[in-house]
Image (cartoon, helix red, strand yellow):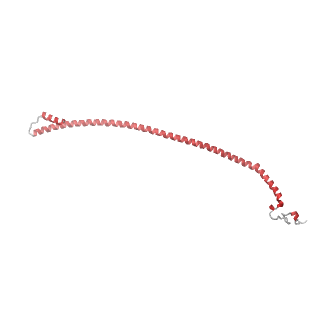
Amino acid sequence: MATEPLAKEVAGTCVDAGGSAIGMPQLCFDWFPNQIFWLVITLVVIFLVLSRVALPRIAAILAERQGTITNDLAAAEDLKAKAVEAEEAYNKALADARSEAQRIAAEARAEIQSGLDDAIAKADAEIAAKAAESEKAIADIRAGALEGIQVVAKDTAAELVTALGGEADAAAINSAVDAQTKG
């Protein structure tokens, strides 16, 4: 039998007499029930594969991620609390160190002031001793100078009396010079 062209009744509206599709076969209304049947079967198979295999894996991964995020947030809160505690401990240690440094500085100042006061008292005592020695030496020098002045005055008075033609009375000259030097 030779291949005869298909009759229009057999071929339908979607296939021409030579067996070729007319236009786009997907849009042929005669084939819609068949296409819908296979579409439903494909969607059911895809749904079963997704619901039994892929979605549980995705849900497990999402749950694991959520657990990891929750754990990380909790760990971050713990670390933040520890950081706050460490900062408070640091600030307390810093304040303690400052107060200790101020205490040590105050003690050092007091010790230095005490040493300075001792040195000043010792220097004042030495100065007072030197001043007393100096005043004693000055008093000795004054006394020696006064005696020297009296001797020179007596000798000068005796020489003047002799030069003026008188006779020098030692007792009179001594009493005159003593009267003049005392007052």
Image vertical order of residue 96 relative to residue 34, above or below:
above
Who's the residue at 24% across and 36% down the image?
139
Q: Is residue 62 visible to the viewer in this orientation of the structure?
A: yes
Q: Nearer the viewer, residue 23 or 72?
A: 23
- Measured along the vertical axis of the image, is residue 60 above or below residue 131? below
Q: Residue furthest front?
A: 29
Where is residue 37 drawn, in percent x and y?
82, 55
Q: How many marks?
A: 0
Q: Is residue 22 left or right of residue 111?
A: right
Left or right: 146 in relation to 34:
left
- Residue 3 drawn at (x, y percent): 88, 66
Residue at the (81%, 56%) spot, across then down: 36
Residue at x-position 13% and y-position 38%: 157
x then y, percent, for residue 20: 83, 65
Query: Quick one: 151 or 68, which is closer to the camera?
Result: 68
Q: Does the rendering let one see residue 6?
A: no
Residue, x 51% and y 40% (percent of image)?
95
The C terminus lies in quadrant: top left
Residue 83, image x, y percentages: 58, 43
